[in-house]
Each structure stands twice: as C-alpha cells, then as structure tokens.
Image: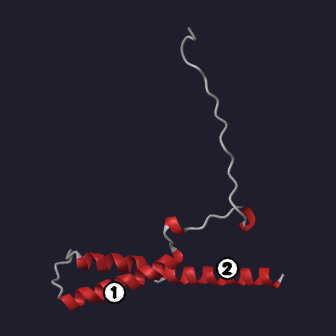
Amino acid sequence: MSNSRADKNRKVRQEALREQLSAQGHVQHVIDISNKLANLEGEDLDSLAIQRLKAAADIKKGLIAKYLPDLKSTELTGEGGGPVELEAPNINFIPVGNKD
C-alpha cells in the first residue's frame, strides 16, 4: 500500500513540476531565440552570442520535454495504468462481379 501512496505522491510532484515549467514560458523563449538566430529581428550576432543562444535553447528544450514530451516517447497506458487493450476490427469480404 505504501508503494501505491508513493506512486501517487510522485505523480502529484511531477504534475506540479510540469505546471511550473509550463508557466515559465520556455516555449516562447525558444521561439524568440530561433528568431534571433534566423536574424529576423535585424540584429547581427557574433559567434559567441550564437553559441550562447544555442546553449540556452538546448537547455530550454530539455525543460520543455519535461512537460511536453515527444510523441514518440510518450508512454500509453490503459485504464488504471494497465496496458492498452485494442480490439481487432472485424473485416467482411464482399465479392464483386459475376462468379462465371
């Protein structure tokens, strides 16, 4: 039972962290950095500034992945945290044309 309580507590902490990270505007900051690197704001950047912006974007992307994970790495669970159950579709073949 303590394992279940520990799991619930961990999920609560994870959700609180995701909400906090989401509220901090990391996605918008990565977009701003991208615009600076693309020189859409008319500002010339030296090599050091570019390296710093890339490092900041990488850090922000890591934080974003904490609350917006890549779809390919998202774990799917079924009801109650169990496996996902799928039903195979029933396929009926209907012949077309004459049998001659």
Q: Position of residue 51 (x, y in %)?
A: 26, 87
Q: Position of residue 46 (x, y in %)?
A: 17, 88
On screen, residue 8 versus residue 23, left or right, reads: right
Give the answer, above or below, for where 32 lies relative to 70: below
Given the image, on which type of amino acid does mark 1 rest?
A: Ala
Q: Which one is earlier in the sequence, the residue at label 1 or at label 2?
A: 2
Q: Position of residue 17 (x, y in %)?
A: 57, 84
Circle 2: element type: helix
Circle 1: element type: helix
Q: Are marks 1 and 2 in contact (CB under 8 Å)?
A: no
Residue 32 falls in image quadrant: bottom left
Distance (Cα) linking label 1 and label 2: 30 Å
Question: Looking at this rendering, what residue extends furthest in the right direction?
Answer: 1
Between residues 6 and 20, which one lies in front from this camera angle? Answer: 6
**What residue is at 35 percent from the left and 82 percent from the top?**
57
Residue 50 falls in image quadrant: bottom left
In the rendered image, which residue does mark 2 sit on? 11
**What residue is at 33 percent from the left and 87 percent from the top?**
55
Q: How many marks?
A: 2
**What residue is at 64 percent from the left and 29 percent from the top?**
92
Could you say which disc has been placed on residue 55 in the image?
1
Give the answer, above or below, for where 49 lies relative to 90: below
Residue 16 falls in image quadrant: bottom right
Between residues 51 and 15, which one lies in front from this camera angle? Answer: 51
